[in-house]
Amino acid sequence: MSEAQAKAFLEKIKANTELQNAIRQADDVDAIVAIAQAEGFKMTPEDFQKAQSESLDADLEKAAGGLSQNCVQNTSRYESGSPGFN
């Protein structure tokens, strides 16, 4: 349940500039968790780090938009000696 709380806190951060500023000033993950707890979220530092990592992975996947798979396919095609590449 606390990982769900961490994800909800991350969503709140995205929409709240005051929280964004507070997070930027935090010295470490324990300080961030203290901010979250002051906002009523219950989580551990591990929960926050896991939720943050998953959120980052999802953001990167959205930004890539399938680009990485296309690059791999194109690279292997070129490496296999497709005409006109040399």
Image: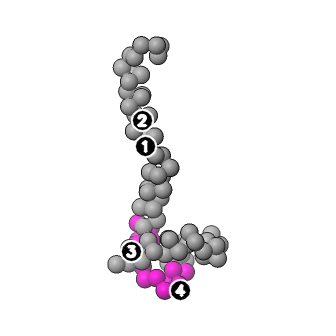
- The x and y percentages for residue 70 are 42, 35
Single out the mark in the foreground, 4 or 1: 1
Q: Secondary structure at mark 2?
A: helix
State if disc 1 and disc 3 touch (CB < 8 Å): no
**Earlier residue among tags 3 and 1:** 3
Give the Cα separation between the discs numbered 4 and 2. Answer: 45 Å
- The x and y percentages for residue 19 are 60, 76
| Number of marks present in the image shown | 4
User: How packed is label 2: few (under 14 Cα within 10 Å), some, or many (20 or more)?
Assistant: few
Whether 21 is drawn above or below 34: the answer is above
- State the mark number for residue 66: 1
- State the mark number for residue 70: 2
Whether 37 is drawn above or below 60: the answer is below
Q: Amino acid at mark 1?
A: Gly
State if disc 3 and disc 2 touch (CB < 8 Å): no
Single out the mark in the foreground, 4 or 2: 2
- State the mark number for residue 4: 3
State if disc 4 and disc 3 touch (CB < 8 Å): no
Single out the mark in the foreground, 2 or 3: 2
Give the Cα separation between the discs numbered 4 and 1. Answer: 39 Å
- State the mark number for residue 38: 4
Give the Cα separation between the discs numbered 3 and 4. Answer: 17 Å
Whether 64 is drawn above or below 30: the answer is above
Q: Magenta includes 9?
A: no
For the point 48% across and 56% down, which residue is it?
Answer: 59
Q: Which residues are magenta?
A: 34-50
- The x and y percentages for residue 52 are 46, 65
State if disc 1 and disc 2 touch (CB < 8 Å): yes
